[in-house]
Structure formats: structure tokens, C-alpha cells
Image (cartoon, grey):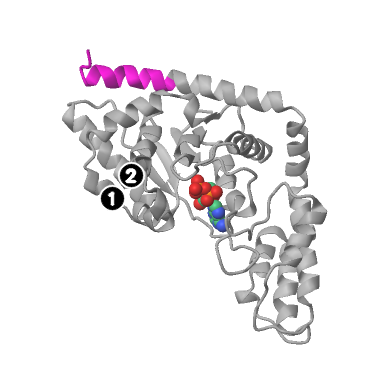
Amino acid sequence: MAKKGRVFSGARPTGRQHLGNYLGAIKNYVALQADYECVYCIVDVHALTTVETTQELRQNTFEMALDWLAAGMYPEESIIFVQSHVPQVMELHTYLSMVTPLGKLTDLPTFKEKIRQQPENVNYGLVGYPVLMAADIVLYKTDIVPVGIDQAPHLEFTREVVRSFNYRYQTKVLIEPQVKHTEVLKVLGIDGREKMGKSLNNHIELALTPEETVKRVREMVTDPARQRKTDPGNPDVCNVFTMHKLFSGQDEVDMINVECRKAGIGCVDCKLRYANNLNKNLEPFRAKRAELAARPHYIQDVLDDGAKRARAIAEQTMVEVREAMQLP
Ligand code: ADP
């Protein structure tokens, strides 16, 4: 079937993926493959802006690729690769940086946030982060980028850079990518308050064993106003109930919605039901992950093949870019 265009998305190599990554990104990556030619990149160079020690980079890349493939990202069609394996992106980054006013970069909210987060390491790469991201996107002649609300300014920035480049060199070689706004679901961590994330250690990894999953789910914070089992609860403010709606059958969700409000079901029981349903849902993923983990060479082959296909597109773009710039 003819595809509707090319999608690009990148994510930093953060190692084993958690439920937030799955529901907020990976699930969408998998779904897009049906209609689009997808290019999915593990952006290890971007990671260097915040990571100072690189010992874990390889392992994290491997673990993330495992999760992606086990979740249904399909390397026979999609291009799945590691950013640093395509050096053309660094070259394009440099050329794009020449048409980028510095003030635009330092004004971006994401840059300001990074200064707050790591005042001791405000490196040059951090300022150029959106330029590298723009290079990633346009290098593959991307039509569409799926983004959540927090990344929207970066996409607008990419479109501006493309216009500036094309105007300066009187060319149409770079394509302005379209934004595909995705309804980004914010998955809360086991604390029931903050966004689920590795740094807060409030996450549930997809690759946990069923027993570890139960243990982690038991730690989840429920309606804080419900102190005892005999107190009625409010599912509307309970993260466990939110997760039930994603992983449990409608009958069970309806039952909990009614019973919790009249203390007919306790939080422990409710959590165990969620953990069981989550485990059941993740069973095929975990089986596939175990099978893939036993074949590390296969993962390497997938990433090598992805890089080869990505480089072919990238080099073609760069030939056109250098030509447009009339580089000697
Ligand atoms: P990055 O720094 O590349 O955003 P993250 O691991 O924070 O790395 O996120 C990878 C992807 O997973 C992003 O698309 C992000 O929006 C999504 N994601 C991460 N945590 C959550 C969460 N708790 N809820 C929803 N989506 C999430």
C-alpha cells in the first residue's frame, strides 16, 4: 500500500523504557508505521548535551532498541538507527547553524529550562540542540513529525530554519516538515503526582518480571483522602483508576468506579487487579523481548542496516545541499 509520506522521530537513549515512554511515544511510533514510511532515531549525540559519562550509552541504546522492537517497531519497513552512525547530520547541523540567529536559540523555553537544570554545564551543544534536531529532521526529507505540546516550539524553529536556508541559497532543497500533533498522554508515576520518569524513580519498566510489576504497583499512591479501607474513595483523582482505564476491561473499570466510591473494593485489591491486567497486556511484549535479548547480534544488525539506509538518504540530501550552497 502506498504510504502517505515520511515520518521522523528521535528519542534519547534512556535505557529500559517505562510505561510513560510506551503510552506517550512508542505506541504511537508503532501505529504510524501502518500509514507512513517511518524513520526512528536513537539520538545519542543529543544525549551528550546532558550526559557527561558515556559508559552507559551503548547499553542504554541496546536496551532501548530491544524495547522498541519488542513493542512492534518493524525494522523491515521502518528505518531504526543510531544518530551518530550518520555523520552527515553533523555537517548539516553546521550549515544550518549559519542561518540561525543566536537569540532565537537562547530564547527557547527548553534552553532556559536546561540552564536551570544544569547551571554548571551550560555547554555550546545545549544552545545548538534545536539546530541539531532540525538537521535530523530535514536530512531525511521528513514530511511529518509527531510532536507533543512541549516540542512544538522546536518544530516551529525547524520550519523557520528551513525557510531561512532555502531563502539564503535560493533553493527548495530542504522540506518544511509538517507537525502532527499527538494527543500526548501524561502518565503519572507511582507517586501519583509527578510525570513518570526514570530520574524521579517513580517509573514502571516494561521489562520488569510479573512479580516485580506487582511489587511496584503495590507502591502506587491512590486517592490521598482515603485513609482506611472503609473510607469511600474517589476514582476521579486516583492514578490507579486512570491506569485501569488503559489496561482493564470495561466491566472491571465500571465495577471499580462504583465500588471504590462506596468502599466496596479496597486499594490493595484494586492495585492487584491492575497489576494482573498490566502483566497480561505486557506478556507478548515480554516474550518477544526475551527472545530478542538472546540474539544481541540481531539487534546490532538491525541498527547497522538502519544506519545504512539512513546514510543513503542523508548523503543524497547533502549532495543537493552542497550543490545549492555552491560549495567548491
Ligand atoms: P526525551 O528526553 O527524549 O524526551 P524521555 O525518556 O523523557 O526522553 O522521553 C521519551 C519519550 O517518551 C518522549 O516522547 C516523552 O514525551 C515520552 N514520555 C516520557 N515520559 C512520559 C510520561 N510520563 N508520560 C507520557 N509520555 C512520556
Q: Are marks 1 and 2 in contact (CB under 8 Å)?
A: yes
Q: Which residue position holds label 1?
A: 106
Name which quarter of the figure residue 101 lies in: top left
Q: Nearer the viewer, residue 147 or 14?
A: 14
Question: Is disc 2 placed on a helix, strand or loop?
Answer: helix
Residue 118 position in % (x across, y down): 43, 53
Q: Is mark 2 within 8 Å of ligand 1?
A: no
Q: From the viewer's perspective, is residue 20 above or below residue 288?
A: below
Residue 274 position in % (x across, y down): 75, 63
Q: In which quadrant is the C terminus drawn?
A: top left
Name which quarter of the figure residue 220 lies in: bottom right
Residue range corresponding to the magenta coloring: 313-328
Q: Few, some or many C-alpha atoms within 10 Å of disc 1 (few <14, some 14-19, many ≥20)?
A: some
Give the mark count. 2
On the picture, is 86 further left or further right than 281?
A: left
Q: Amino acid at mark 1?
A: Thr
Q: Amino acid at mark 2?
A: Val
On the picture, is 93 further left or further right than 77?
A: left
Q: From the viewer's perspective, is residue 219 above or below residue 65?
A: below
Instruction: Tell me, yes or no, whether the highlighted magenta stretch contains residue 320.
Output: yes
Q: CA distance from mark 1 to mark 2?
A: 7 Å
Residue shown at 33%/27% (left/top)?
Answer: 92
Q: From the viewer's perspective, is residue 126 above or below residue 58?
A: below
- Which label belongs to residue 174? none
Main secondary structure of the magenta stretch: helix
Residue shown at 68%/51% (left/top)?
Answer: 205
Instruction: Tell me, yes or no, whether the highlighted magenta stretch contains residue 245.
Output: no
Upstream in the sequence, badge 1 or badge 2? 1
Q: Which residue position holds label 2?
A: 127
* Residue 76 seen anywhere in this rendered image of the structure: no
Residue 221 position in % (x across, y down): 67, 71
